[in-house]
Amino acid sequence: MTNHTSMLVAPSILAPSTVNHVNANGAALLSTMVVALVASLAMGLLRRQKVGATDGSLASIPPYTPITYPFLGSLQYFFGHWDFLKTAAEKGSVSFHLASHKCIALSLETRQAFFSDFKTDSALGYAIMLAGTPNLSKDFMKAVGIDVTLGGRSYKYLTALIRKERVITNMPILYAYAYTQMGGLAGTTIDPFDTFREVIFRLTVNTTTSLNVAADPDACNALLKIFHGLDLAATPVTVLFPWFFGPDRMRRFYLMKQFYNTIRNTINERKLKGRNDDDPMQFLIDEGLSTIEITQFAIAVLFTGNANTAVIAPALVCDLATHPSYLSQVREEIEAFISLFNADTSLPLKTRIQTIAYDEWIRPGAFPIMERCLKETIRLRVGTPLHRLNHTDKDIQMGSVIVPPGTIASFHTSFVHHNEDIFTAPFEWDPERFTQGREEDKKSPMAFVGWGVGRHPCLGQKFATFETFLLTALTVMLYDIEVVDQHGKGLIEMPPVDLNNPVVSPPPTPVHLKLSARA
């Protein structure tokens, strides 16, 4: 039996940039965690993990990676997610740990089993790997008010709120919000990743949380700042030692209390005035959810609904702007699409676009060129680890890998999205790779996982597609667009993709859009 806590990292195993980052930040991180580490050792949180078959079958718990520090585990994960997972799992799946959290880095060959599994839970996996949930026990999480799954009910509620019939009734409001924030920007230079995030957050609040909050731009922006603060407060310390009530944990607690107060005040105002609005919040109230449960649901849904789309949508526009031939084709495609419903080009775009039904935006084949462009932007820009927690009391088999109870299985999308054996020149933006006859994503099973695959498709794919296509249409039809850096200098291509982020993120160097009114 191997004691994984005795292994030391060999710095040369990781990429030089990652090693330098670890060296530069390691001292500060380790000093911050001294008190927590002593307490951790005293509590005996670290356990030996049995390696090998658990039932006599060929499946087994993967061996431990040598890329680790004593006691704390693979801190390299925090400073280079892709560098670590790629190197650790290069020759097959491996086990690793982050303090008391047991993890498995899955290799490319295990992806089909990973995406086909229905026993593990992604919400709980992300709660631990991104926020540092204090305990793996769902009962404990419910007791302290952080059960992000609401006992599994959150999926049911989200499905109900984003079903077609509910979205259709809100289309006039969604159009108005989108145009209000995207119109009138001619002559300005914007950070598209900030501007689009504000719009998408408001549309998502309106659809999944509360019409009242969405109607108040200041309230929406206040909530968005809370989410930004929660992101900043999710540090290696909060993940490694979730029970340690340090500065970051206190900040997260304070921010979540602010979010709770907003939800509580909205509910109380509704009750005081005797209103019974037909909106998401009233739906959740009628379902019997408490204020804390509505808060939990809203935090989970707004994070999920905003995190990816708010990066992918502006990235698509930037990718189009740096590829003029595609921008021209997409403009022609959008104009032809709008003309199907209102061909009067003398009318303002706002008037013409409001005649289009929700179904039409998400109809397969409505935008064949833009659909390919979006798919390519997702493939290129989505390079992040996916996490699933075995929250059961039994081993779960994923292909040849055994995932023990309380263990998080992680798979990085770059094993497929940036794999040169699957995609030609994988770091180049090339929508033609998805055209008939080429179809590189069909070379290998589950080669494209941007919208989820297998048993785990993205529940909000249709609504996210609508948001992305609507904002792209408004931007490219209202403005001539140019990608520039923070100094206003034109860029002919987007910055290289950084695959070491824990979530989908904007480019590593600032990118802006210079907008001019179209003639």
Image (tube, grey):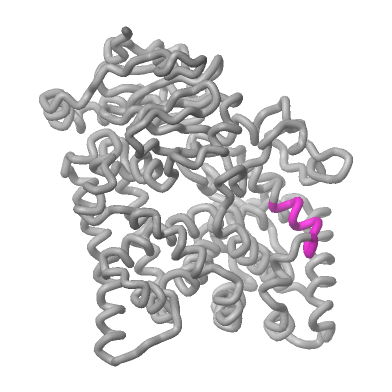
Q: How many marks?
A: 0
Give the residue at x 39% y 28%: 395
Q: Quadrant of residue 281?
A: bottom left
Assign the magenta stretch its main secondary structure. helix
Q: Quadrant of residue 222?
A: bottom left
Give the residue at x 84% y 45%: 435
Location of residue 515 with respect to 35 vertically, above or below: below
Give the residue at x 49% y 19%: 59
Give the residue at x 41% y 76%: 283
Q: Position of residue 32 (x, y in %)?
A: 20, 33
Outermost residue toward the bottom? Answer: 273
Q: Is residue 367 magenta?
A: yes
Location of residue 411 with respect to 173 vertically, above or below: above
Q: Position of residue 474 (x, y in %)?
A: 67, 71
472 left or right of 301 in image = right
176 left or right of 145 in image = right
Please report the bounds of the magenta region as a residue range: 365-374
User: Which quarter of the rendering shows the N terminus?
Assistant: top left
